[in-house]
Amino acid sequence: MEFLLIACVALVILLLYFGFIKNDLKKSDKIQQKKQNSTGVVFARCPLCDSPLRQGENLISKVYRPMDVPDQFCTIYGCPHCYPACENHLSRICPVCHKKVPQNGNLTARLFNKTTQKKHVHITGCSECHKKKSD
C-alpha cells in the first residue's frame, strides 16, 4: 500500500516536472520566433524626426573629446531618414523648444558614459534654441 502511494506521488512529480519543462520550451520558442519574425525595428527613435531606427541604422552625431570622462558634449545631426536629406513625409522638430530645425541644424546634447558600458544622452536644445543674440 505504501509502495503504491509513493509510486503515485513520484508519477505526479514527474508529470509536473516535464509539464513545466515543456512550457518553458514553448516560451523560449515563442521568443525566438518573435526575434526571427521582427522587421528589425529597434526600440530607438530619432530625436529629430521620430522615425524608428532599424537594425544597422545609427544616428549621425559627433562626440567631442576627451573620451575618458563620464560626461561629454555631443552634436546630433539626425538619422539616415532625416540627414543629410530629409524624406518627404518627415519634419525635423526639436524635442526641447518644439521648433522646426533646419536641414543644416543640429541638436546639442550631453553624453553620459556609465560604468556599465551603457550610454545615456540628454538633449539640451537645438541650433535654433541656442542661437547667439546679436547686439
Image: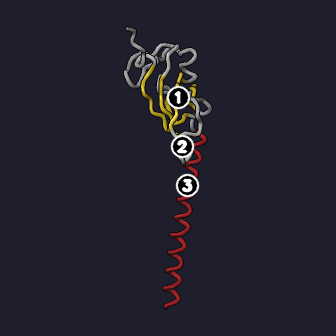
Q: Check the picture and name the quadrant holding the C terminus.
A: top left
Q: What residue would you read off at disc 2?
A: 118
Calculate the distance from the C-alpha at mark 3 to the C-alpha at mark 2.
31 Å
Disc 2 crowd rating (10 Å Cα; few below 14, some 14-19, many 20+) is few
Q: Amino acid at mark 2?
A: Lys
Marks 1 and 2: CB-CB under 8 Å? Answer: no
Q: What residue would you read off at disc 3?
A: 26
Marks 3 and 2: CB-CB under 8 Å? Answer: no
Query: How many numbered marks have been drawn onto this rendered protein structure?
Result: 3
Q: Amino acid at mark 3?
A: Lys
Could you say which disc has been placed on residue 103 in the image?
Answer: none
Q: Secondary structure at mark 3?
A: helix
Q: Nearer the viewer, mark 3 or mark 2?
A: 2
Q: Nearer the viewer, residue 18 or 49?
A: 49
Nearer-N-terminus badge (3/2): 3
Could you say which disc has been placed on residue 74 in the image?
Answer: 1
Residue at the outermost front position:
135
Marks 3 and 1: CB-CB under 8 Å? Answer: no
Q: Position of residue 91 (x, y in %)?
A: 46, 17
Q: Residue at x 56, y 18 (%)?
A: 83
